[in-house]
Image (spheres, grey):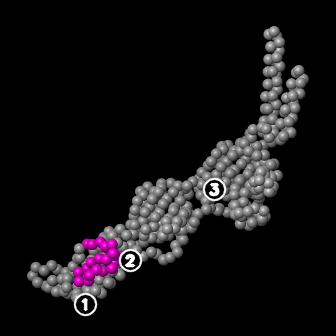
């Protein structure tokens, strides 16, 4: 009976060993499987997803080391000249009319008790819903859609045959037609009016109290004329050309969106990690995930999973003709046991939603196997001991 039990447990252990330890617990695929299946594809529906295995080396590091944007975004580009701020319905203005000599249309004759100065202040008024203002002896003057100098010229032209060499000064008291909304993750969201000199995107955000979160986590979304464009604030700060002029009725919305990567396998910590900056390297990402576990990791089996752009893979000489679409499933492999491995990892640029997998060392799999064998042997010994105790009891 004892020999039969030992033989049974030995056969189970051998079966586990022959199956490549596939029955043992593990945190991910075997590194040999990753390398062998890198270019396997099949038309069968149940076939595994085909992917491209790309070893990172000195030849392709030139491209892989270029800091591409962690998250794709639009580019804020000024497509026209600096906006001219014009009057609009609801704006409140004041008008002052000067004449060259006393005794004119708006100024009294020089008599005792007469006020000094050959000018008159028209009561403050707002541009009406039809876009007009009212000026004595000039009638309804169109103001909406016009600049202040243009309104001054119209009034002056209408009064030139009635007043004595009139000069007109129009002043903007309150501005209501050039409202810009700044909302979202800013410290003081609300509606702001644009100054006559024109204001740029970052100036408006500053006036709204600035962003609540770091620039590399803050997305700026601008809506203009029914169209939206979005960009990372850190890129707007880095590129002055993207700090465009804001136009009346623009809507600006700030949204927090953190770029992240995933680390699994034999790393110090498994989970989802944020980018500390807009651009981080693989070595920085591994360090953020706790490094490689000395007692478990296989430094020669470090992989980065990514859906890579088709044009980029073609640029580094990878044949992707067998794939459809513009996003190619790609696994980059780095051998950290190689003397240049750390240099490669220190230049390899991570991207949003990358996944790092660190494989287990072969000794770890063997230790797992021995644990199963030891557990089986202990169980067998317990069964024999229990049998002897039962016989002795009867």
Instruction: Using the image, tell me which numbered label, if any, was put on residue 352.
Output: 3
Residue pictured at 83% horizontal, 19% vertical: 384
Residue pictured at 44% horizontal, 64% vertical: 204
Percent coordinates x, y for residue 273 in the rendering: 61, 49
Q: Is residue 382 left or right of residue 142?
A: right
Of 73 and 130, nearer the camera is 130
Residue 63 appearing in the image: no
Residue 181 colored in magenta in the image: no
Of 198 and 135, nearer the camera is 135
The answer to which image quadrant residue 364 occupies is top right
Percent coordinates x, y for residue 210 in the rendering: 45, 58
The answer to which image quadrant residue 87 occupies is bottom left
Q: Residue furthest front?
A: 45
Q: Earlier in the sequence, mark 1 or mark 2?
A: 2
Percent coordinates x, y for residue 51 in the rendering: 76, 56
Residue that label 1 marks: 161
Q: Secondary structure at mark 1?
A: loop
**Number of the front mark, 3 or 1:** 1
How far is mark 3 from mark 1, CA to CA? 70 Å
- Image: 353 above or below 84: above
């Amino acid at each position: 009976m004892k020999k039969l039990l030992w033989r049974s447990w030995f056969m189970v252990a051998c079966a586990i060993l022959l199956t490549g330890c596939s029955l043992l617990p593990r945190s991910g695929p075997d590194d040999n499987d990753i390398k062998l299946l890198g270019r396997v594809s099949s038309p069968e529906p149940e076939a595994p997803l085909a992917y491209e295995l790309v070893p990172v080396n000195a030849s392709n590091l030139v491209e892989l080391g270029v800091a591409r944007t962690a998250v794709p975004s639009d580019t804020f580009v000024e497509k026209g000249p600096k906006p001219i701020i014009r009057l609009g319905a609801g704006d409140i203005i004041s008008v002052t009319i000067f004449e060259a000599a006393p005794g004119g249309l708006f100024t009294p004759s020089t008599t005792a008790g007469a006020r000094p100065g050959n000018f008159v202040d028209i009561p403050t008024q707002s541009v009406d819903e039809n876009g007009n203002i009212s000026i004595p002896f000039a009638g309804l003057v169109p103001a909406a859609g016009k600049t202040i100098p243009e309104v001054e010229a119209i009034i002056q032209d209408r009064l030139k045959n009635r007043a004595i060499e009139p000069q007109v000064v129009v002043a903007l008291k309150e501005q209501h037609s050039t409202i810009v909304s700044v909302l979202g993750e800013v410290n003081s969201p609300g509606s702001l009016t644009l100054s006559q000199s024109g204001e740029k995107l970052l100036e408006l955000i500053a006036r709204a109290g600035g962003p609540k979160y770091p620039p590399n986590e803050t997305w700026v979304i601008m809506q203009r004329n029914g169209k939206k464009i979005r960009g990372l604030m850190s890129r707007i700060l880095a590129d002055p050309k993207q700090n465009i002029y804001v136009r009346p009725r623009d809507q600006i919305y700030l949204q927090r969106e953190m770029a992240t990567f995933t680390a699994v396998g034999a790393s110090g910590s498994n989970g989802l990690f944020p980018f500390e900056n807009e651009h981080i390297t693989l070595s920085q990402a591994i360090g953020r995930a706790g490094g490689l576990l000395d007692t478990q990791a296989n430094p020669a089996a470090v992989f980065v999973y990514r859906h890579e752009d088709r044009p980029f893979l073609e640029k580094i000489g990878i044949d992707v003709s067998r794939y459809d679409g513009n996003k190619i499933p790609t696994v980059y492999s780095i051998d950290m046991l190689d003397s240049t491995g750390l240099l490669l990892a220190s230049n390899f640029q991570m991207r949003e939603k990358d996944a790092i997998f660190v494989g287990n060392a072969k000794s770890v799999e063997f230790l797992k196997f021995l644990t199963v064998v030891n557990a089986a042997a202990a169980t067998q010994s317990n069964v024999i001991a229990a049998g002897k105790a039962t016989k002795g009891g009867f």
